[in-house]
Image (cartoon, rainbow, N blue to C red):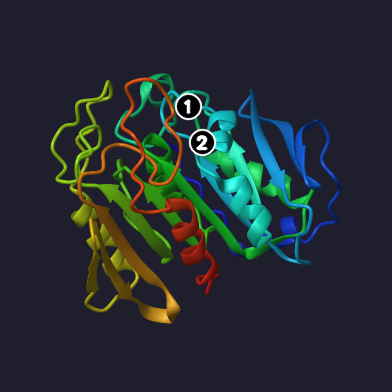
Amino acid sequence: MRRIRTSVAVLLAVLATAYAAGSGVAAASGGSTTTVHTITVDGRQRSYRLHRPASLPAKAPLVVMVHGGFGSARQAETSYGWDAEADRRHFAVAYPDGPAAWNVGDGCCGRPGREQVDDVAFITRMIADIGRRLPIDPRRVYATGISNGGMMAYRLACDTRIFAAVGPVATTRLGDCPAPAPLSVIHIHGLADENVRFDGAPGTGIARIDGPPVPEVVAGWRAVDRCGRPTVTTSGPVTTESARCARGRAVTLITIEGAGHQWPGGQVVRDRADPPSKALDATAVIWDFFAAHAKR
C-alpha cells in the first residue's frame, strides 16, 4: 500500500483556510447537524458524514470515527454515541464510508485489500476537506474505530503525521509500521473477543484475523513514545494499564473481562453480534483521553 507522510505544515495551511457551512444536511437535533459530503480520490468517489454541534470553539477538535467491517458511516454514527458526546463536549466528528471494509495492510480486508484501495489517502483528504468547512484545530485531530476500523486507525497512525492520538477498539495492528510518528494511544479490548483475539491467535470471523497480540502492539507504541513503566488499576471487570511518555504523551490499554467483539457502552450492531459491555462507556473514556492529549 502506498504510504502517505502528511506534514504538519501542509495540514496547517489547509486547515487555516476560510471555512464554509457544508451542504446536504442529513440530520439535525438541537441546532447540531450531520451533513454528507463526497470527494474524489484516485478516481473513486468517496463519501463521509460530518457532525457539527450547535456550538464549536474557534479552533475545534475533530474526531474521525472509522466503522468496522460490514459497517457504514451511518451505522457508526448511530451505534457508538459520538454525536451526543460531541454535542456535550463541543467537537466535530467525521464518519468516513468504507464501504464495508478498509485496506489496513497484510491484504486485509476483502476487496479494498485485494485492490489496494488507498484508504489512507481518502481519510487524509477528507480531513483537508473538513478543514475548508469548519475551523478545525490541527493540533487536536484524532482517530478511533472498531475492529477493521480500529486497524484503520492504527494504519493512519503508522502512515501519516496528522493525528494527536488514536483510540482503537476490539482490534489489532496489521501491516508494516517501521517509523511511526509519536502520538498518544488508548486501546480498548474485551478479553472474550473471539473475532480479534487479545492473544493474537486466529480469530473466528470471516477474515480470520491473526495479527500480533494486543500487548505486543501496545508495547510497540510505548517504545515509540518513550514511555515509563505502566501503572495498573482494576475496577470490577475493567483493568487499565497507563503509561506516561515523553512530551506529555500517554499509552493506555484497557481490557474488560468477559467482553466480546463490541464497542463497550454502544448499541448492538447486528443479529448474533456480541452484546456491548456495560462496564465501560468507551466513547466517553476515549474522548477524555483525546481531550487531554493535543499534538506536541
Foreground: disc 1 or disc 2: 2
In terms of depth relative to the viewer, which is nearer, 185 or 161? Answer: 185
Q: Residue 170 location in percent, x, y?
A: 32, 43
Residue 122 seen in the current view: no
Does residue 231 sit above or below 96 in this rendering? Answer: below
Question: What percent of the width, then of the height, locates residue 135?
Answer: 77, 59
Q: Secondary structure at mark 2?
A: helix
Q: x and y percent of residue 74 in the render?
A: 59, 30
Q: Residue at x 31, y 42 (%)?
A: 171
Instruction: Indicate the amino acid at tag 1.
Output: Gly
Q: Nearer the viewer, residue 259 or 127?
A: 259
Residue 26 at x, y percent in the picture? 75, 31
Q: Is residue 57 in sight in this rendering?
A: yes
> Residue under circle 2?
79
Against 223, is 199 above or below? above
Tag 1 and tag 2, C-beta contact below 8 Å? yes
* Residue located at (61% from left, 28% from top): 42
Q: Residues within 10 Å of mark 2 (few under 14, many from 20)?
A: some
Tell me if 42 is positioned left or right of 197 in this view.
right
Q: Which residue is mark 1?
A: 71
